[in-house]
Amino acid sequence: MKQIMARKNAKHVFLPSVRCSSAVLVYAKLTDNPADELVAVLNANRTAHKSSSLTDNPGLACIALQYIKAYQGDCEAVGESDAKKPPDSEFAQTFSPNCRVDASTLSPITGRFLGCQSKYVQPSEAFSMLIKNEKSLEILYSKNQTEIGAAVTGTDGGAPYFWCVLLSNGKHNSSFVLEDGVAKISRPGCFSGANDDCSGADVSSPFGHKWVYAVTAFIAVGYAFGL
């Protein structure tokens, strides 16, 4: 996979409200990390629908990146009809140690959104890929959700590209707690909440665009479900 490179300039993104017939544009200043940008899109849509903003938990986000890597680049395993997922035991046995997350602080995963696509898309387009039906919206807007973590990475020098969002009902500062309070940055891949500049999954994608507009009609493989 091509080396992920840091960007220097913050983005400004227009965010859509997917339930409206016409896009409701929300302005936000974001850091140089597509996973952070995706979290901003998701939170903007929650608040637009009278739900509280979710806490971006870097421990949970790091686990989201490990969750992607468990698929080993197999995009077909993300299909809707026979969607696969890593065993729940992997959270404590593999994902947590790889992220230096204290396994005793793991909280239930109350929602998962996973998408895979042959080309890199902007975070606002990834939103439309991941949140594409009423079931997805119910999970996203649920008042039981309290924390969020997002991740993106490519595979073997490029495509396919995976996006993952994990939701939890854990308590702030007591769930998915990082050892020494420091997120374990790993490449390739980007995850949210780590205060880490990360250019995304492919340096050839159009990261330099200062203004990004959401494409709500984007179609790609993705699924969402709650536990």
Image (spheres, rainbow, N blue to C red):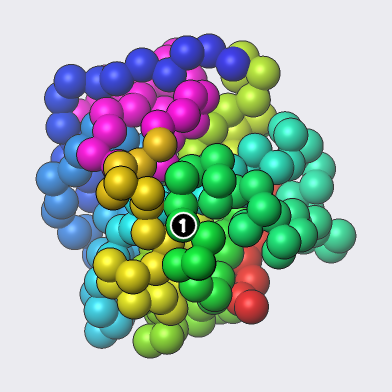
> Tag 1: residue type?
Asp
Residue located 14% across and 53% down the image: 27
Dividing the picture into quadrants, the one containing residue 161 is: top right
User: Mark 1 falls on what kind of element?
Assistant: loop
Mark 1 packing: few (<14 Cα in 10 Å), some, or many (20+)?
Answer: some
The spot of residue 125 in percent (x, y) is 44, 46
Residue located 58% across and 28% down the image: 154
- The answer to whether one can see residue 18 in this image is no
The spot of residue 163 in percent (x, y) is 54, 45
Q: Is residue 204 magenta?
A: yes
Q: Is residue 25 magenta?
A: no
Residue 180 located left or right of residue 141: left
Dominant SS type (magenta): loop
Residue 199 located left or right of residue 74: left
* Residue with the mark numbered 1: 102
Residue located 55% across and 40% down the image: 98
Q: Which residues are magenta?
A: 185-212
The spot of residue 199 in percent (x, y) is 35, 25
